[in-house]
C-alpha cells in the first residue's frame, strides 16, 4: 500500500494566506487575474540566463494542497479565518499556466511564466514558484557558462556537500539540463534520471597502509578503467603507482589540488612516457567558469565542479519576481496593472514573447507583444508553451523525460545566440528585450 505524497502547500510565506483571507472577506478573491514571473535584470555582467525548474514546479504544484495537518496548524495559530480554512481545504489549482520551455534562454524582462487564475489561486503560488525558479535558473545559467568554455569536454556536478540536501538535487538537475554530463548526487539520478558517477576520496587512500594498497583495492573492485585520485601525497609517485597497479587499461587519474595548468601538463607528459596515452585526466579543484577557461589550452579531459555551480557562480538567486500584471475589474473588463516603484517597475498586460532571428537563424532580439503577438516579417520563434491548462498539468515537461527534453531544447536555444553572448567578460545582455504595444509603439527594457 503506497502512502500519499506529502503536501507542498506550506513551502510558502504566511502573507500569501493573509492576502487571501482579506480578499475573501472583501469579495475579490475570485477576480480573474494574470500573474507573471520575470527577472528585472541578469546577475551582474551576465549576458543571458537559462530557464530551469519548470518540471520541478509542475510536480510540486501537483501536491500543492492542504490536508488536515496543514489546516490544523493554520487554525491553531489563528493565521486565517474559518472561511479561508474552508477555501484552502478544497484548494486545487484550476487555472492555466504558460511559460518558457525548460532549457530556454531568457533576458531581462522576459515573461518566463504566466499564471492565469483567480487572484487567490494564483497569488498563493508566488513563493513556491519563486523559490524554484530563482535557484534553478541561477544554477543552470552558471552551468551553461561552464559548458561553453569547456569546449566539448565533459563536466560533472559534484557540489552536494556545498548546499542544502534538497537544493543539491535541484542543482544536479539544473546543471544537467544546461549541459553537464553527470552528477555525484544519487537522488538526482533516482528522481530525475541524471547520470551518476563517483569513485573515491582522499580518505580512501588514507585508510590504507600505502597508496599502492588503496589503488589495488579500488581497481580490484571497480576495474582498471576506474579513475584514481593521485594527489593525496606526491603526484608524480601517485601517477607512477596508478599505472603500475592498473596498467595500460587505467581509465583516468584525478587531480584535486595544486597549480593545475602546470600540474596537468606534467601529468600528461608522465602518462604518455609510461605508455598510457589513453588514460584521461580529470581536474576537480574549486573550479568555476574562469578557471575552466584558463585550462583551455591544458590537456584536461574532463572537469568536476562543486561549489561554484551549486551557488550559481556567485549569483545564488536569479532576481526573479512574481507580479500581478492584469485583472478583471468590477465592470467585467480586463485592466493592465503594473508596479511603478523606482527601480522596481513592471510592465502590465498579457504578454506574447518571441525570439526574433535573422535570415541565418541567429537571434537578434527578445520581442514581447503586449496584448497580442508582435507583427513581423522576420523569423520569429514563439516562446510560451502551455504547461497547465484548466488545472491539468502537461506531463510532457515532467519526470525524467521532461529533463531530457529540456536538455535537448537548451542545446537548440543556445545555438541561436550570437557568438558574443558566450563571452565570459562582463557585458550587457546579449539581446535587447523590446516591448511592443498593440498600436506599434516600442519600448526597450532597461
Image (cartoon, grey):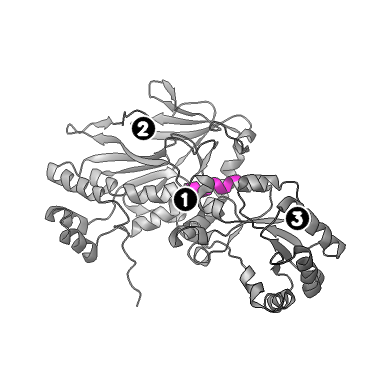
Q: To which residue does mark 1 refer?
A: 136
Quadrant placement of the C terminus: top left
Q: What element carries label 1?
A: helix
Q: Which mark, by number, is residue 264?
A: 3
Looking at the image, tell me whether mark 3 or mark 2 is earlier in sequence order: 3
Report the mark closest to the observer, 1 or 2.
2
Count of numbered labels shown in the rendering: 3
Magenta residues span: 138-145
Q: What element carries label 3?
A: helix
Labels 1 and 3 touching (C-beta < 8 A): no
Q: Pointer 2: residues within 10 angstroms few (<14), some, or many (20+)?
A: few
Give whichever of 277, 259 is nearer the camera. Answer: 259
Labels 1 and 2 touching (C-beta < 8 A): no
Residue 335: where, in percent of width, then height?
A: 26, 30
Mainly helix, strand or loop, the magenta region? helix
Q: To which residue does mark 2 refer?
A: 344
Residue 87: where, in percent of width, then height?
A: 18, 54
Q: Is residue 22 magenta?
A: no
Amino acid at each position: 500500500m503506497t502512502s500519499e505524497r506529502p503536501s507542498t502547500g506550506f513551502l510558502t510565506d504566511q502573507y500569501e494566506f493573509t492576502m487571501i483571507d482579506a480578499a475573501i472577506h472583501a469579495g475579490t478573491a475570485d477576480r480573474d487575474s494574470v500573474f507573471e514571473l520575470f527577472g528585472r535584470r541578469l546577475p551582474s555582467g551576465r549576458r543571458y540566463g537559462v530557464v530551469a525548474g519548470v518540471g520541478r514546479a509542475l510536480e510540486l504544484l501537483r501536491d500543492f494542497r492542504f490536508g488536515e495537518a496543514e489546516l490544523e496548524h493554520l487554525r491553531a495559530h489563528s493565521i486565517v479565518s474559518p472561511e479561508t480554512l474552508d477555501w484552502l481545504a478544497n484548494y486545487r489549482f484550476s487555472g492555466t499556466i504558460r511559460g518558457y520551455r525548460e532549457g530556454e534562454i531568457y533576458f531581462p524582462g522576459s515573461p518566463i511564466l504566466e499564471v492565469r487564475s483567480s487572484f487567490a489561486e494564483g497569488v498563493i503560488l508566488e513563493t513556491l514558484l519563486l523559490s524554484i525558479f530563482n535557484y534553478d535558473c541561477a544554477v543552470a545559467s552558471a552551468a551553461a557558462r561552464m559548458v561553453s568554455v569547456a569546449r566539448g569536454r565533459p563536466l560533472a556536478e559534484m557540489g552536494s556537500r556545498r548546499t542544502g540536501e534538497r537544493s543539491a538535487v535541484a542543482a544536479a538537475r539544473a546543471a544537467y539540463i544546461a549541459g553537464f554530463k553527470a552528477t555525484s548526487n544519487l537522488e538526482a539520478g533516482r528522481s530525475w534520471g541524471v547520470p551518476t558517477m563517483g569513485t573515491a576520496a582522499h580518505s580512501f587512500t588514507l585508510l590504507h597502509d600505502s597508496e599502492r594498497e588503496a589503488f589495488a583495492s579500488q581497481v580490484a573492485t571497480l576495474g582498471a578503467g576506474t579513475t584514481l585520485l593521485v594527489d593525496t601525497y606526491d603526484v608524480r609517485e601517485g601517477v607512477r603507482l596508478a599505472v603500475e597497479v592498473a596498467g595500460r587499461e587505467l581509465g583516468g587519474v584525478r587531480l584535486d589540488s595544486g597549480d593545475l595548468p602546470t600540474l596537468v601538463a606534467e601529468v600528461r607528459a608522465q602518462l604518455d612516457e609510461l605508455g598510457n596515452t589513453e588514460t584521461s585526466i580529470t581536474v576537480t579543484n574549486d573550479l568555476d567558469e574562469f578557471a575552466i577557461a584558463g585550462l583551455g589550452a591544458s590537456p584536461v579531459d574532463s572537469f568536476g565542479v562543486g561549489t561554484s555551480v551549486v551557488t550559481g557562480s556567485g549569483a545564488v538567486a536569479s532576481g526573479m519576481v512574481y507580479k500581478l500584471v492584469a485583472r478583471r475589474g468590477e465592470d467585467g473588463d480586463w485592466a493592465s496593472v503594473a508596479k511603478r516603484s523606482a527601480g522596481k517597475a513592471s510592465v502590465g498586460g498579457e504578454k506574447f514573447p518571441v525570439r526574433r532571428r535573422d535570415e541565418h537563424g541567429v537571434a537578434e532580439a527578445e520581442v514581447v507583444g503586449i496584448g497580442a503577438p508582435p507583427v513581423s516579417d522576420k523569423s520569429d520563434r514563439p516562446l510560451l508553451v502551455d504547461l497547465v491548462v484548466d488545472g491539468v498539468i502537461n506531463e510532457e515537461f515532467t519526470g525524467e523525460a521532461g529533463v531530457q527534453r529540456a536538455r535537448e531544447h537548451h542545446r537548440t536555444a543556445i545555438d541561436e545566440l550570437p557568438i558574443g553572448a558566450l563571452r565570459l567578460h562582463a557585458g550587457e545582455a546579449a539581446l535587447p528585450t523590446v516591448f511592443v504595444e498593440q498600436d506599434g509603439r516600442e519600448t526597450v527594457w532597461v
